[in-house]
Image (cartoon, helix red, strand yellow):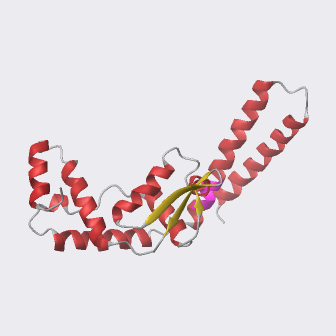
Amino acid sequence: MTESWTRLRAAALDSLATLTDLLGDPATDDRRLVSGYLETKMLLAAAFEALAGEKYTDPTVLDSAKTVVESAMRSLYPDLPVKYLRVRGFGTVHARLLAYLARRVMSDVSAGELRMLTGDAVHTERRTRELRDLGFQLDARHTSGSDVYVLRSNEPDPVAGAATLVAKNIREDRSISKTEALAILRAARLS
């Protein structure tokens, strides 16, 4: 393990010990207790994000999916401008989430587990659902008071991913009007 994980783990343990002392002292005022909780939560999130960064940094699954989908974009939509035939917007957080899910294909993965990978980031679940745009079959459901995700396969559906992302690229093109975007979408049979 790296120095970052080791250092952050030690800091989180110290903070947890302090919080335990605060919780055990009936004289601790509410503000100090809340402050101790928030500090511990922040340090734990940072420590587990560092751990996740070490264990799930392999971008291979995401890079492979992007390559396959871009190839499908070019073959399925050869008449469209190249600017629409690129996979955009999938970065380190997506790679980490996908690497984690790919090791757990067909298994329930709680939203809490996924948030742990990103330091409890607010948009973790959205980033997870965005993997569907690449053609990954990712189911989501609510069970036992928690949101759960299930990746059905390590392999994306390149045709679905290509269609979704080409349409998204066209819709997000600010250099054309909405009317022009609709015309391009219709011509590509994407509307």
Closest to the observer, 122 or 182: 182
Q: Quadrant of the N terminus?
A: bottom right
Q: Is residue 136 above or below residue 116?
A: below
Name the main secondary structure of what is drawn in magenta.
helix
6 left or right, relative to 163 = right
The image quarter containing residue 65 is bottom left
What residue do we see at 72% from left, 42% from top? 40
Residue 134 pos. (x, y %):
35, 64
Q: Quadrant of residue 3?
A: bottom right
- Say which quarter of the image contains residue 131: bottom left
Left or right: 151 in relation to 9: left
Residue depicted at x 55% and y 73% = 103
Give the percent coordinates (x, y) of residue 6.
70, 58
- Left or right of residue 36, residue 128 in this image: left
- Whether 95 is among the magenta residues is no
User: Which residues make up the magenta segment?
Assistant: 48-52
